[in-house]
Image (spheres, coloured by chain):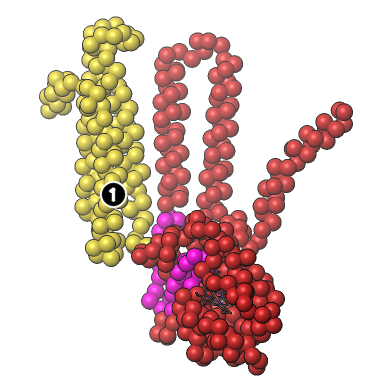
Amino acid sequence: MVMRQAIGMLRGRATVPLLLALAGCNQQQSALVPFGEEAAVLRHLTVVMVAGAVVIALALAALMAWAVRAPEGRLGLRGGERLILVAGGVLPTVLLLGLLAYSLPAMRPRAVAPADLRIAVTGEQFWWRVQYEPAGAAPVTSANEIRIPVGRTVLLHLEGRDVVHSFWIPGLAGKTDMIPGRRNVMAVRATRAGLFRGQCTEFCGLSHALMAFDVVAMPAAEFDRWLAAERQPAVAPAGAGKALFLANGCGGCHAIRGTGAAGAIGPDLSHLGGRTTIAAGMLRPTEANIAAFVRHPERFKPGVRMPAFPQMSEAEARAIARYLKGLK
Amino acid sequence: MIERLRARARSLNVTLWTLIVPPTVWAAHFLFSYLWAAIRCAKTGSFSTAPGVFWACTILALLVILASGWIARVQSRTPGDHPPHEEGTETDRLRFLAYATMLLAGLSFVGVLFTAAPVLFLSDCR
Ligand SMILES: [Cu+2]
């Protein structure tokens, strides 16, 4: 009995640090594991503020413990008034002013130059329209994945299409709302390469929680090569997929550069085969997943804005998936 | 000069209405700050590099708060009645209201400073 109680207590004690440790395990989507300068500043601020709060809370607890134990009349009227003035007025003002002065420089916006890469990201139920707008070149359209060059300032132009969404890449920077009819601008700079993740953080409908995306931070030269390739029409693999794609009317909603498909209602699929996920960060980009999603997107994302194609045979869906997966 | 002002302050009467002057000025300055930044950004597209109007209004707000705090301080020392000034008499009520006004003025003063501080660091409309 005693033994069991002891184990239970131990378990209770161990859970909290364990949970904290687990939260630190996430390397892809964590404000505690920054890969951008803005997020690093935020984490630093958080640590300083939390440390400050802990010190203040401990000091207050000590003061209260002392106040409860001290004999009555220990502090005279003058002493009491002085304590209130100092501990209740002067000290908080000075501390808050100090923390404010310390944190304010973080509000200074990152300097941007006209030559900086712009990426326009539009939140739509329940996916992300992405358009790369390099200075002096035509824009390149993509979707559901954001690639950024390490060490360069990137401007994100954020907007909502239908309802309010919110754009958050915890490892890169703070979060910013995407509001229809209003463009919010955020300037960021990645500090190391890797595969990270972002998520919609403003409830936007049934599949809000299923609206995420991968973020690929790449060395700058590699990014330039990637963007040049992304600009080209996709090289389509042989097979019946392309004809089926067009025959089923997919091109009314989806664009694939270099084919007749030029729809702008759904995500651009020009280089779907090069992406790390499909369906806005929800599925591994395997042929089987693409085929299953195309026939029944609503099974994966409730309220999805793409119609189901239940009449399509498994074989046809597979052929389309093979075609889409081949669009590198 | 100071003596004249003090006599003037002593002749004023602190009430529940004058008690809310400092926080109201703080609130007005707060609202003004947001409107000023939003309207400037909307009309000119760029954050002001020399926000003269903003600092003028901030100093004005601080002066009003200082003045009401000072008047309250003078009134909180109104003579008459015995310490510890916690009876239900005219004088004690006056002293209490004045003291509360003075504390609120202190809080509002710091509040206005805290509200204004970010302008030192903001440099564009993002
Ligand atoms: Cu959402």
The structure residue drawn at horizontal position 54% and vertical position 29%, both measured from the top left corner, is A60
Residue A149 falls left or right of residue A179: right
Q: Quadrant of the N terminus of chain A?
A: top right
x and y percent of residue A17 in the render?
71, 44
Q: Residue at (44%, 82%) from the top-left corner?
A: A139
Q: Nearer the viewer, residue A69 or A283?
A: A283
The residue closer to the viewer here, A272 or B65, is: A272
Q: Amino acid at mark 1?
A: Ser
- Can residue A191 be seen here? The reply is no
Q: Nearer the viewer, residue A205 or A115?
A: A205
Q: Reply above or below: A44 against A121.
A: above
Which image quarter: residue A220?
A: bottom right
- Name the residue furthest top: B82
Q: Position of residue A218 (x, y in %)?
A: 59, 75
Image colour for chain A is red
Chain coloured yellow in the rendered structure: B
**Left or right position of A80 against A190:** left
Magenta region, residue range: A105-133
Q: Mark 1 — on which chain does it sit?
A: B
Circle 1 residue? B33
Examine the structure image and report whether residue A195 is included in the region drawn in magenta.
Answer: no
